Image (cartoon, rainbow, N blue to C red):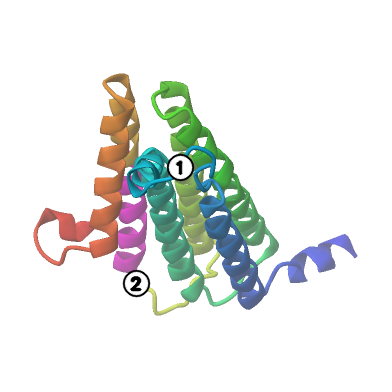
Amino acid sequence: MGTRYNLIAGDSVERLAALSDGLFAVAMTLLVLDLKLPAREGIATDGALLAALSALAPRVLVYLMSFLTLGIFWVGQQTQLSHFARCNRHVTWIHLLFLFAVSLMPFSTSLMAEFITLRAALLLYWLDILLLGALLAASWRYAMRARLVEPEVAASISRSVEQRIYIAQALYAFGAALCFVSTWWSIGFIILVQMIYVVGPRRGILSRI
């Protein structure tokens, strides 16, 4: 009975995609809750309000970075799922672990926003990104071996998917390493990498990512 159950468990790509969409939506919404309104007390002029809002700039920057992070990984996961002919319980659990890492993003974002100049906070944030990338890569490699991917997906497409993940993780790791110089350098570099992935250059070496 157990073997028969395992053969049919977690075989719906559509249900996995629906769960992923919902969890990504919740995580992306929770990010903005860390942006608190300035306290009403002591603010009586436009200048005082603008000064209070400017103090939120670091948190807004981290919010932007995390929103882009989740957006990029949502696109990556949906790209994979759209090429799956079917699922099985193993790849489903890989994606559930991936969603676990997604659910941690609001916490790691809040931690870094609160301690934006501390290396430990940024490295923990990077570990969340590393976990997301590792699980996405594991999902694709397993799906290819288990023949869960649509037959028309050529080997070149598979290499492109994996290459994109590996290059991104290498760039994120370099960005994280910059925190030993300055956490601001790390954040700036990571956002630059994200913008490259969002824009998707069509020419030159950057077109490979």
Res. 169 visible in picture: yes
Instruction: Judge left or right: residue 108 versus residue 10.
Output: left
Task: Please give the residue where the numbered disc 2 appears in the rendered image.
Answer: 154
The disc at residue 43 is 1
Q: Position of residue 164 (x, y in %)?
A: 31, 55
| Kind of residue at disc 2 | Ala
Looking at the rendering, the stretch of residues picked out in magenta corresponds to 154-170
Residue nearer the viewer, 97 or 56: 56
**Foreground tag (1 vs 2):** 1
| Quadrant housing the N terminus | bottom right
Magenta part, dominant SS: helix
Q: Quadrant of the C terminus?
A: bottom left
Q: Is residue 199 above or below residue 150?
A: above
- Percent coordinates x, y for residue 169 in the rendering: 36, 43
Q: Specify the amino acid type for callout 1.
A: Ile
Q: Is residue 178 above or below residue 103?
A: above
At x 52%, y 73%, the residue is 84
